[in-house]
Image (cartoon, rainbow, N blue to C red):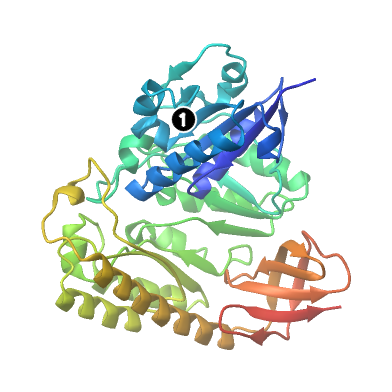
């Protein structure tokens, strides 16, 4: 009988894709969705903040109690930043780096503990033809980042920006579309940098993706404002483009953007957002609240600018120190309670803006149903707004069109017959 492997994934969509890469390369083991049944547990870790590291360590400690006989292997970004110390303390059986995940079957067979971190120049070559437990597919198109934002450790653990081979990306989408997937989400460390090392661009890749039979909708994980050029803007009205873009601003105060060593400024950000919104797009962003030097005056300026900018979604978080980054050594740290209050203010404002957007975009909604419980189904429309659908027929993984929806505080609700 084959030994069973359980995968625990922390963090971003890139990590979710990397887990699928490992799953696709398993040959001599079976994959289980039950942690308790596992002989081996692979932890694909995140290290974006100290808090992320703490979550991973907490899981490692707790899983030892729940499944004491399982071998635990650490992968992902945390393997680079914390793997050595955890290995030396014998808290884990093995450690592998990003470049080793395609050899996962080899490492699972090892009888002795191991530490093999590999290198940060690796580019995936695995073609993932199935996404276990998913109705939409994540497609990693690049790895690494050349930016040097003061709060971020990711370039240190993911390496410099490098694009995956276009042929592999397109072949992967062809296989997935043949297997019934119609929505594809492009992901990577810095998605918008795709092609900069290959005399190409993300816009050129999108055009080729759209020509593959079966591709109905393409979402893009996250873009930097400076990466949205005229070539990309020409695609905004294409029917296969999801009507939602996530554009990483991180802040709306120019002084805070300078402190964070960012490459964008509010005047240009506002102009860009207004232009894209004019094409009927919902717009999301990351936002760091409470970064060092964020005074009350700068926050008041920032929140007023958030009111002006056509944002409909937000991925906000209070600043958390990340060891070995410039921001971690900065003075003028912001009190945690103040940061939490600012976060609540920001969330409330975007909640109101999102509800207003949904009121104005409540017809002709195209929804991919992802999961359900009893006869209540859940999915996202083209604007990346969550919708809850009641149906007496099974519509799991189906595309449905809705014209009558009830707009609630948190989500839209509809009936489907």
Q: Measuring 51% from the left and 87% from the top, which residue is drawn there? A: 356
Residue identifier under label 1: 98
In this rendering, is residue 215 above or below 106? below
Across and down, in percent, residue 117 comes to 41, 23
- Which element carries disc 1, helix, strand or loop? helix
Q: Nearer the viewer, residue 36 or 85?
A: 36
Q: Measuring 59% from the left and 29% from the top, which residue is drawn there? A: 68
Across and down, in percent, residue 316 comes to 38, 65
In this rendering, is residue 127 above or below 360? above
Q: Nearer the viewer, residue 51 or 155?
A: 51
- Name, please, the residue furthest toward the top: 112
In this rendering, is residue 393 above or below 166? below
Across and down, in percent, residue 30 comes to 73, 28
Residue 159 appears in the picture as rendered: no
Query: Left or right: where does residue 296 sit relative to residue 64?
Result: left
Position of the C terminus, as image quadrant, is bottom right
Q: Measuring 37% from the left and 39% from the top, which residue is drawn there? A: 161
- Which image quadrant is residue 377 in? bottom right
- Name, please, the residue furthest toward the front: 65
Query: Left or right: where does residue 359 sit relative to residue 371?
Result: left
Position of the N terminus, as image quadrant, is top right
Q: Nearer the viewer, residue 244 or 340?
A: 340
In this rendering, is residue 207 above or below 54? below
Residue 379 appears in the picture as rendered: yes
Across and down, in percent, residue 18 comes to 55, 37
Query: Left or right: where does residue 37 sit relative to residue 152?
Result: right
């Amino acid at each position: 009988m084959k030994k069973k492997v359980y995968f625990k994934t922390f963090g971003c969509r890139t990590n979710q894709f990397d887990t699928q890469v490992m799953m696709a390369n398993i040959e001599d083991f079976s994959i289980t969705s039950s942690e308790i049944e596992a002989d081996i547990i692979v932890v694909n870790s995140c290290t974006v903040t100290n808090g992320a590291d703490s979550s991973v360590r907490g899981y490692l400690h707790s899983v030892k109690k729940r499944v004491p006989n399982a071998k635990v292997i650490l992968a992902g970004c945390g393997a680079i930043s914390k793997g050595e110390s955890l290995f030396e303390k014998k808290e884990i059986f093995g450690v592998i780096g990003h470049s080793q995940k395609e050899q996962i079957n080899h490492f699972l067979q090892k009888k002795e503990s191991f530490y093999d971190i590999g290198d940060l120049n690796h580019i995936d070559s695995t073609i993932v033809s199935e996404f276990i437990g998913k109705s939409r597919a994540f497609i990693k198109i690049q790895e690494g980042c050349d930016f040097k934002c003061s709060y971020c450790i990711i370039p240190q653990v993911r390496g410099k920006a490098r694009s995956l081979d276009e042929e592999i990306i397109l072949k992967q989408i062809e296989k997935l579309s043949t297997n019934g997937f119609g929505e594809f989400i492009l992901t990577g460390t810095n998605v918008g940098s795709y092609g900069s090392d290959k005399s190409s661009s993300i816009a050129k890749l999108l055009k080729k993706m759209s020509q593959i039979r079966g591709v109905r909708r393409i979402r893009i994980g996250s873009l930097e404002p400076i990466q949205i050029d005229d070539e990309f803007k020409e695609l905004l009205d294409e029917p296969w483009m999801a009507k939602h873009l996530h554009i990483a601003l991180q802040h709306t105060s120019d002084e805070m953007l300078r402190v964070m060593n960012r490459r964008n400024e509010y005047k240009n950000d506002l102009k860009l957002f207004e232009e894209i919104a004019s094409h009927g797009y919902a717009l999301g962003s990351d936002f760091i609240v409470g970064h060092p030097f964020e005074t009350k005056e700068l926050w008041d300026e920032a929140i007023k600018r958030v009111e002006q900018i056509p944002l409909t979604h937000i991925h906000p978080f209070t600043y958390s120190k990340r060891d070995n980054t410039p921001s971690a050594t900065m003075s003028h740290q912001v009190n945690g309670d103040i940061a939490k209050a600012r976060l609540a203010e920001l969330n409330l404002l975007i909640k109101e803006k999102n509800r207003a957007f949904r009121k104005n975009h409540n017809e002709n909604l195209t929804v991919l149903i992802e999961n359900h419980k009893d006869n209540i189904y859940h999915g996202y429309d083209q604007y990346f707004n969550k919708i809850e659908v009641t149906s007496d027929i099974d519509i799991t993984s189906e595309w449905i069109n809705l014209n009558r929806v009830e707009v609630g505080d948190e989500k839209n609700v509809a009936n489907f017959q």
